[in-house]
Image (tube, rainbow, N blue to C red):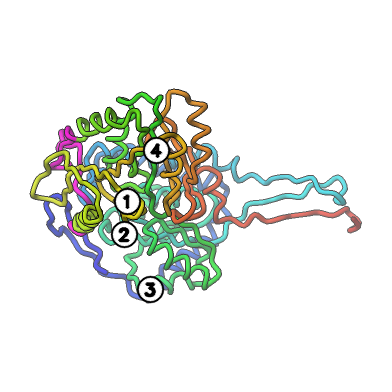
Amino acid sequence: MAYATIDPYTEQTIKTFPDATEAEVDAALQTAHDTFLEWRNKPIADRVAVLAKAADILEQNRSDYAATLTLEMGKITAEAEAEVDLCVGMLRYYVKHGEALLAPRLIPAKGYGDTDVQLVNDPMGVIFAVEPWNFPYYQVVRITAPQATAGNVVVLKHASNVPQSAARMEQLFLEAGAPKGLLTNLYLPHDLTEHVIASPYVRGVALTGSEKAGSIVASLAAKHLKKSTLELGGADAFIVLDDADVDKAADWAVFGRNWNAGQVCVSSKRLIVADAIYDRFLARYREGAAKLVAGDPTDPKTTLAPLSSTGAVEKLKKQVAAAVEQGAKVEYLAEVPEQGAFFPPAIVTGITEDNDAFHTEFFGPVAQVYRAKDEDDAVRIANDSPFGLGGSVFSNDIHHAQQVARRLDTGMVAINHPTVVAADIPFGGVKNSGYGHELLDLGLKEFVNQKVVAVADIDGTF
């Protein structure tokens, strides 16, 4: 594996980084463990003080941090700055709420007289985090903020194409006053992954990435009896019911499918539209997507970023070509520059259930569009997927939309909006989209020992 910064717009290699050796990995794990032994005993107020400082640093240097995202994975400046803002919000959420969320829970129990049984939240140790490139800061903060609050420490293996973003996250926490080892960035080669997971210091594994990577890492975690959480792919359904505001829904669909160049696990990948409004919706979507401007991601006029790499472009081309070979129709909606890892915004229609595309995630600005006979048919199409991460329901009847949302076999559903990504909303999916949660109290307690402390009567009797 070669860790390297390759500008997706210019396609120039900016800098490369050597893989960590086994000796360097072992030294990093030892340091992380030693840090944990001290960090776990610090008052929660002291732990979150580091998060508060990190939030301030990000906020004060917003443009500088955003520029690294643009350089490494081509994110347009506005979206890069929005990612920094989201990180600030997550950090401050745990500053404000961490101590209360970790307070012991008191459980009245028969036979224990006037005493209560306590359920306390003890940190477990080193958490190994494997993170993807599409949100290089957000993914790291999403695991580090709650785990540092809980008293754990994090060893990070980031994606190979965002090495400078990974290093900046480690440096951010050091600058904020964290001890060395609270967040450790490792340029880890694949062949040392099991070595890390097998370490007695590592107590949990959190991965965000592909199904293939998730399957491999979860298997290794199970082999070594380590708890794991997985946030994998998604093919989110964007359901538009016949009473929806069609123009509003189509405009949100353009955003939901094409932000971050469509490289979002919870982007609106499958647009499922009621028959009565299908033609109007599709015309409005075409019109909106045609206005997207692909180009230099640092140019304020640019609204469509390049993909993360030329490899990502080639993979998407093959997926679209395969869908067409099996009977679907593709329509490209805007021009993109020849320079850079661009893919034009597109729609794919006429996808039948025997087409491989019907059950495939397209990671880029390509929308699958389905005509639903009615509401039940829309729900059927939405649920006929191996994935279950997010989804949307558009309707002018909010209460009915909520009822439809309950019928969807997915972890998160937004009403009249493409997604539910926010600092104070938990994140997680079902089926092939993974298991476990991040953020809020759910993410905070994924890697704690919820220990029972029970006191019998003073004489030891029950």
Identify residue for label 4.
419
Which amino acid, mark 4? Thr
Spatial CA span between label 4 and label 3? 35 Å
Spatial CA span between label 1 and label 3? 22 Å
The magenta-colored residue range is: 290-311
Q: Image check: 270 left or right of 449?
A: left
The residue lying at 27 percent from left, 45 percent from top is 350
In contact (CB < 8 Å): disc 4 and disc 3: no
Against 291, is 359 above or below?
below
Q: Earlier in the sequence, mark 4 or mark 3?
A: 3
The residue lying at 51 percent from left, 53 percent from top is 436
Q: Which quadrant does the N terminus fall into?
A: bottom left
Spatial CA span between label 3 and label 2? 15 Å
Q: Residues within 10 Å of mark 4 (few under 14, many from 20)?
A: many
Identify residue for label 3.
192
Give residue 432's position: percent from left, percent from top.
44, 56
At mark 1, the secondary structure is loop
Q: Image check: 41 left or right of 215?
A: right
At mark 2, the secondary structure is loop
Residue 365 sits in which quadrant?
Answer: top left
Identify residue for label 1.
136
Q: Earlier in the sequence, mark 1 or mark 3?
A: 1
